[in-house]
Structure formats: C-alpha cells, structure tokens
Amino acid sequence: MAGKAFKKFLPLFDRVLVERCAAETVTKGGIMLPEKSQGKVLQATVVAVGSGSKGKSGEIQPVSVKVGEKILLPEYGGTKVVLEDKEYYLFRDGDILGKYVD
C-alpha cells in the first residue's frame, strides 16, 4: 500500500503505522546536542493505515489520516515495529493528537 517494505505488513482495523521524524541534533546557533538532552520527537509521517474500525451498528468508520500526512503523537504509547532495519510505530487512530495542515 505504501511501499516495498509494507507489502508484507498492513495495519488492521483503526491502526496507523508511522515513522517518527529525526530528532534535532544541532541548535540554531550550531551547538551539537548530546542524545540525552534531545527531546522525544512527537512529529511523525503516516506510512500505512488500516481499513477502519466498526461502529455500533456495524458500519466501518474510516481512519482519520491518510498515507503521507504529518501528524502529532502523544509523548508515550505506540508499539515499536522494526521492518527492514527501520523503526516504525503503530498507534490507534484515536491516540493521534492532530495532523499538520500545509
């Protein structure tokens, strides 16, 4: 659905597979930051989405984000998934805090 690595993995129901953005390693002034002082990255890019969750009457409610969108994640949570030596995280659609609009 989203790329070669994801032909073998597709999230189910209301799950969203994301790739976290890289942490800032250099400040605007040019000072390099050690790993301990780098904050947790809360921004991510959606890589694959599930079909959606079932509502009370049985209809499927689609996931609120699409592949390629940039989203805001909670500081904690998600399930770490390693595909082809890259780290991805699996979140429920309801756990996503928001999405960035161009």
Image (cartoon, grey):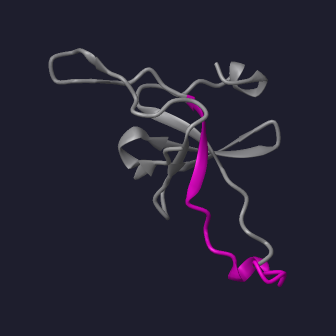
The residue at 61%/34% (across/down) is 68
Residue 41 falls in image quadrant: bottom right
Q: Is residue 31 magenta?
A: yes
In the shown orientation, is residue 96 left or right of residue 10?
left
Q: Residue at x 76, y 27 (%)?
A: 5
Quadrant where the C terminus is found in the figure: top right
Q: Farthest front residue?
A: 102
- Assess whether residue 29 is covered by the magenta stretch: yes
Q: Is residue 14 above or below residue 1?
A: below
Rendering quarter of residue 84:
top right
In this view, 65 is above or below 81: above
Residue 19 on image: x %, y %: 65, 45
Residue in view at x 35 percent, y 43 percent: 94
- In the image, is 35 to the left or to the right of 62? right
Q: In which quadrant is the N terminus drawn? A: top right
Region of the chain picked out in magenta, as a range: 28-48
Does residue 94 appear to the left or right of 85 in the view shown?
Answer: left
Tell me where residue 49 appears, x and y as whole percent: 52, 28
In the image, 101 versus 20, the foreground residue is 101
**7 or 28, which is in the foreground?**
28
